Image: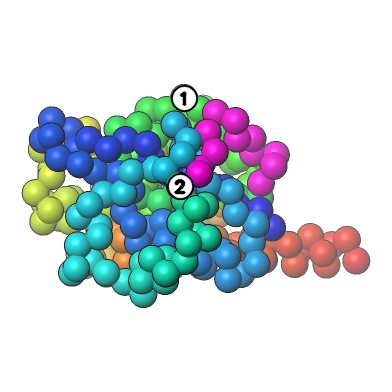
Amino acid sequence: MKILMVFTSHDILGSTGRKTGFWLEEGAAPYYVFRDAGIDLTLASPKGGQPPVDPKSDLPENQTAAMARFKKDPDAQKVFATTKKLKDMRSEDFDAVFYPGGHGPMWDLAEDLDSIALIDSFYNAGKPVAAVCHAPGVLHRVTYKGEPIVKGKRVTGFTNTEEEEVQLTKVVPFLVEDELKRLGGLFEKKDNWQPFAITDGRLITGQNPASSTAGAQALVKLLKGAAEQASSTAA
């Protein structure tokens, strides 16, 4: 099985002058879920190369087991430092696509035409699309059969109260929760910072950084289920 992970290339937090990027846990934890499952991984970003890491994600209070493993893994660090260019990626080369969050995707991937077309291509080909935390925001311009891709779907993502807690409600281009609801998504959530991921058909969404492992595991489960079904049908 082959999964494409798509990272942000954006590193400025709105007009604050502060740095942002992808949330390190949301890259590291899914990377190891996929790698440990024997999945062939390709990483991409709009600019290629090293995607920016949100410095807040690497603060002492935000350390996780996956991040500790990543910091001791030069091979993984090299993979992250050499992402492919997003415009060169094709859905036919992969079985699914996974978007890690962090605030960065709100500015580039949410409006990136290559990303929008890629998600559209994956979904129309019957392949899963997964996104965690702020990354469900990258779905807001994607349509399926003329309707927003999230319309009528159970979804989750970074909540309004979580955004309020990090005091960025007035900084982000839009609030993930409000936008998914506006588009007709059936938004669900747990308490702030609790792990929570939803699978609805071929769409998988996770609420926050703590949900990145669950979101990745849900994608692996979905792919394995589809492979087993295909195998039994062929037999």
Q: Is residue 61 above or below residue 93?
A: below
* Residue count near mark 2 (Cα–Cα under 10 Å), binned few <14, some 14–19, many ≥20: some
Q: Quadrant of the C terminus?
A: bottom right
**Label 2 sits on residue:** 81
Element class at badge 2: helix
Identify the residue shown where x is 60% and y is 54%: 41
Secondary element type, mark 1: helix
In this view, the residue in front, 96 or 123, is 96
Residue 119 x %, y %: 53, 37
Residue most extreme to the bottom: 65
Indicate the position of residue 52 as horizontal and vertical percent values: 33, 43
Amino acid carrying label 2: it is Ala
Disc 2/disc 1 C-alpha distance (Å): 23 Å
Q: Residues in magenta?
A: 82-94
Q: Is residue 87 within the magenta segment? A: yes
* Amino acid under disc 1: Leu
Residue position for label 1:
113
Q: Residue 6 appears at what percent x and percent y?
A: 48, 44
Which residue is found at the position 42% from the left and 38% from the top?
139
- Place residue 10 in its image quadrant: top left
- What residue sits 35% from the left and 31% below the top? 108
Can residue 216 be seen here? The reply is no
